[in-house]
Image (tube, coloured by chain):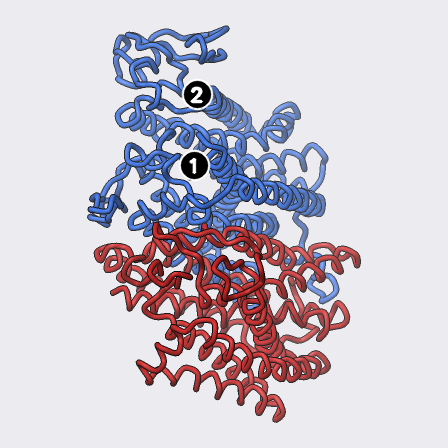
Chain colours: A red, B blue
Amino acid sequence: MSTLWFILIAFMLTMYVLLDGFDLGAGVIHLFAAKNNVERRMILQAIGPVWDGNEVWLIAAGGTLFFTFPVLYASSFSGFYLSLFIVLWLLVLRGIAIELRSHVSEPVWISFWDGVFFIGSALLAIFYGVAMANVLRGVPLDKSHYFFEPLWTDFNPYSSNPGILDWYTILVGLLAFTTLTAHGANYIAVKTEGIVNERSRRIARLSWLATIVLAVLVTIATFSVQPLISMSFFSRPWGFIFPLIALVGLIGMGYFNIRQRDSAAFFSSGAFIIGMLASAAFGLYPDVLPAVNPAYSLTIKNASASLYAQTVGLVWWSIGIVLAIIYFIITYRLFWGKVRPTEVEGY
Amino acid sequence: MDASTILSRVQFAFTVSYHYLFPQLTMGLALLILILKTMYLLRKDERYNVGARFWAIIFAIAFVMGVVSGIPMEFQFGTNWARFSVFSGDIIAQTLAMEGAFAFFLESAFLGIFLFGENVFGQKIHWFSAFMVWLGTWASGAFITASNAWMQHPVGYTIAADGRLHLSNYWAVLFNPWILPQYVHIMSGAVITGSFAMAGLGAYYLLANRHTDYARLFVTLGVIAGLIASIIQLYPSGDAEGQQVTNYQPVKLAAMEGLFHTEKGAGIIIIGQPDTTHQRLDNPIIVPGVLSFLTYRRWSAEVKGLDAFPANQRPDTIELLYYSYHIMVGLGTFFIVIMGLAFLLWLWGRRLFLSRWMLWILMLATPFPFIANTAGWFTTELGRQPWIAYGLLATVQGTSPTLSSGNILFTLIGFVGLYMLLGLLYVVLVVFQAQRGPVVEEKTPQKVEEFAD
């Protein structure tokens, strides 16, 4: 049952990165792919009706983590205290930037929120990579399952007292940034025509090239920083399917970008994200939060809720998620198709 | 109580009180907008629809603020209350996670359709989306109430060998007897906030002689809904909550009533300042016998005072708890009087619309339901102390062990700054929209820019 919940939470977080990932990426390219108010509103129009729902996947994943693995929830949220609050504040600022920007037609007001939208989106993309890297690298858990990580210590991932930021976590942060930028650029390319579409494709290509370089570096670094990962893959070789999916996605991102097939490129960047996140989850299992001292690691066993709670939860969770998926299909179908400057309404 | 615990309490209290300023308005307005939209479909009078569209804009601004200030809440159980989360995560996280799965997905999907879909999808789907938004916001309220009700009155658990709680009965948690009175009380409180806002803005338009057609509609709906909700707030929901506190949390009752000593035929205190050092009340105005009657339905019944409980079982901020309760009850009484009077004037040949003094009162009353609702939450939460899960886990034992007070103060200061900015923006935008008022939109691409969102 705990294994099933491990997979389901990995699924929810992957859904979150896939969905909110493209609107974060849209925020990153917003200043560069769109130069004037009409163009910028096309980008906001493309994500406006869906960004809030996308973000609910994060909230829902947080809640699900809480009732299925309460020890992990308590330990990691209190241990990552400072970085978590910075993420929350960025989410707050970015959310109001999207919603309030077009309420007042005043150039300075609009420029201010455009800037907040960009900074919030970019920093969030980096911080999500950093968070992922912290979990992969491991944290200084003590024997009562708690830890506290300062924002930085000596910037050394091999340290016995690591911080949130070190050269490894920053490297993964940059990979997350280029990946989500490409993903968002692909999405905007799908949703627009004309000059915004062309600029988005160009940004997608540049960030694709950066992603290749960073993905290679991160892969090498990860095997060095966390030996658990290679142990997982060599003891269960079928797991190599996940990096393979990522590789196919990475190739597809470039191939379809050059052929100007935006939807295929968007699905490729999605496949890359799925492959990378699934590889990370597979590599960690059965740990959910490795410790610097492996004896104190949190695993699906010692971090989980009672079997009854996990079983009851599975029943209502399944109903809730089926409903959520139905809502998502309805919303995305209703707002299907390209956004056009003449149709710009609301955002 | 150490500095970390105090700062964590202050941070949670600050962020949740601030957050709740917005949901109480949106939950109330969601119902009123649904009523306006339904009236439009029934009577085919365009005013109802334009009115609904106008309030949807105000709703949307408050909703965004509620969403962004709500995101940190779910995470703060883990960040600042880690040991409580481990202790009771099996149970309390069920209802919190259900809110995400059943309410948030629904709200986020249908709000987009409700705000942008009227011209595209037609009136029936638009009404349906208004209905779903109402359902989503009220379902949200139900799950949060269920979570809080469990902290007030824990049920459906067993204590495992490692000291953690295990969920033993899901349905007992979901149908905790504490939930129903609390839920009704919270939701009618939200309707009061929404109704006073609607009536208050309508009254302002009438006083300023603007949008008078819509103003009459807003005042009428606000006064009728506000009167019904204000009465429900007193009876049955307020009374039922009083009964529960009497039966299950007698020490909370003693503290909120300012009853220092056990008394037969205890009176109810209208005004007075508690002096906890000397265990007495200064400058009291007391109506004798009433407290005994309200709690035990007998004028001479004995009501336990604070002296009946050991000091370490009493709430630790008796003064604030006492004032919160009295502010809530006092304002609640005024709400019934104000709305009752306005309703009578309305019945009496619609004199309400011409009675400037009454319109002034309605307009100036707008902020007070926010205060009353906040004071109500202060009452129930301060009265829960010193427990985080009533009778099971003390608040000081629920904190995050690795967190320094310096780090908590850092985030607390950050929240204060950020939320001041949000508050300013909110006020500016609502005033801006209220100044524009309900107008029939000319749908040209350049114009729509202005009624954004």
| Residue B250 in picture, x, y percent from top left | 30, 22
Residue A236 seen in render: yes
Asked if the residue under mark 1 is in contact with the one under mark 2, i.e. CB atoms within 8 Å, the reply is no
Label located before the other in sequence (2 or 1): 1
Q: Residue furthest right?
A: A107
Question: Which of these two is toward me, A157 or B399?
Answer: A157
**Which chain is disc 1 placed on?**
B
Question: Which of these two is toward me, B93 or A335?
Answer: B93
Compared across the picture, whether B387 is left or right of A273 comes to: left
- According to the picture, the residue beneath numbered tag 1 turns out to be B188
| Residue A304 in picture, x, y percent from top left | 29, 57
Disc sitting over residue B318 in the figure: 2
Q: Kindly identify the residue that appears in the image at 43 percent across and 73 percent down.
A: A280
Q: Kindly identify the residue that appears in the image at 67 percent across and 81 percent down.
A: A197
* Few, some or many residues within 10 Å of mark 1 (<14, 14–19, 20+): many
Q: Disc 2 and disc 1: Cα gap in Å?
A: 27 Å
